Image (cartoon, grey):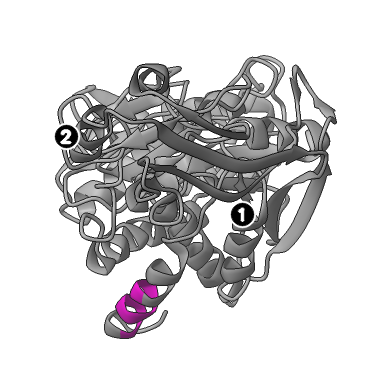
Amino acid sequence: MTEPSALTSEIASYANRLFPIARSLTGEGNRATLSILKEICDLEVYEIPSGQDVFDWRVPQEWLVREAWIADSLGRKIVDFEVNALHLVGYSVAIDREMSWEELEPHIYKHEFLPNAIPHRTSYYKKDWGFCVTQEQFVALSAESGRLNVRIDAHHFDGSMSYGEVVIPGESDRELLISSYICHPYMANDSLSGFLIAALLARHIAQLPSRKWSYRFIFIPETVGAIAYSALNEQEIRNISAALVITTAGGPGKFGLKKTWDEGHWLNGLIEDSLTSLSKDFVSSPFSIRGSDERQYSSPGLRINTATVSKDRYHEYPEYHTSLDNLDLVTPEQLLETFEVYLDVIDRIEKLAFYRNLEPNGEPMLSKHGLYPTLGGSKVPKAGDTSDLDLMLWLLFYSDGKTPLSHIAKKLGLEDKAFDEPIRALMDSGLLGKG
């Protein structure tokens, strides 16, 4: 791994280049973003044509903005897309006309309680237009007694939606999906933090001398991008063992774990162990249907257990979806801190041991295999005396090839090493195999 000081400088350099790019669901901003990320990790860029049906959704048209502004009657620009892409409601249609403040006001959005913030608003799937402004700009517009000049030079056309992918093979076909979205413009915690950390993580994993797991990284527009990728890679996505969505990972506040839809899944305990061992102050939250693309991967047809480690999660910090979510809020040091957490999570995943009961239909006849009841006893904390026979039976019960040994041990209040002898005996007898 690169030295922390050098990595901090690298993160700062990439963050400064990536932040002022006008990203959206489609378009050149996304391609420019993927091009920069390609400098970090060996990703491939793919295009999905506009109009293609993907499950219950359809890939949208491309959106190209040449200019968008509001000027007073003397031609002085009060609001300008070129200054900040958040000024324009995402996917606004073209307009070029003079109007009064009364006509314009329904198309103007300001933040409810942050007067200096430009809010982030979109109208992806309904033809509309609008501008987002600070309180000062709102007052200036509303004070205009003359006609206001409103221009949006925007074009919707059949093009494509871009996404990036990195597939890193390992020794087994057990695969982890790591997903981040690239569609949010001019916001550092919500979007930039996620895809920058993901790219650095892909590079790190690719440089490991060996890997037990395979890893699939995708850089996509949120929601429709995750759905489109899943639809077009249905066989691959159904073979995913677990997933991480990296988003809102660079704020100054606490770490957070949003758990998988199955709260008992091993990934949750593994991440909690990681955060605890790194002495991070964190909050665990259950899965909810509000959030990012974990909703898509966890849907009934896919059911991939997907977790998120965040640092100031979406909806939970005041600057969320505003221009104040910037590089003053998100520092390279904070991004590095979260990156190091994900490194530890990956290291723990790589160390997981999986076993499979080779006689899974009912309880195996242990006496036939010389295993009943010849082994010595062991203590199970707070559960009374339990023999190695019981540990063998528990191992056979839980060893489905999907549940790691560490998770089985945690359920029984034991250390992994307590199972060393039962595992050896079961494997020697042919009842247990590597998962």
* Residue 420 point in image, percent of width and height: 45, 49
Residue 29: x %, y % from top left: 59, 56
List the residue tagged with mark 1.
Answer: 30
Category of crowding for the residue at label 2, using alpha-carbon neighbours closer than 10 angstroms: few (below 14), some (14–19), many (at least 20): some
Which percent across, then down, holds residue 363?
Answer: 63, 17
Badge 1: how crowded within 10 Å, few (<14), some, or many (20+)? many
Image point 35% across, 43% down: which residue? 309
305 to the left or right of 100 = right
| Residue depicted at 46% across the width and 64% down the height | 18
Estimate the spatial distance between the alpha carbons at disc 2 and disc 1, rounded to whole Å: 28 Å
**Compared to 194, does 127 lie above or below?**
above
The amino acid on which the numbered mark 1 sits, given as a three-letter code, is Asn
Which of the 4 image quarters holds residue 369? top right
The magenta stretch is 6-12
Pointer 2 with pointer 1, Cβ within 8 A: no
Nearer the observer, 318 or 89: 89
Q: Which residue is drawn at the image coordinates 66% and 21% (left, top)?
A: 365
User: In this rendering, does residue 171 appear at all?
Assistant: yes
Is 9 left or right of 164, judged from the image as shown? left
Which numbered mark, 2 or 1, is in the foreground of this view?
2
Q: Quadrant of residue 106?
A: top left
Residue marked by disc 2: 114
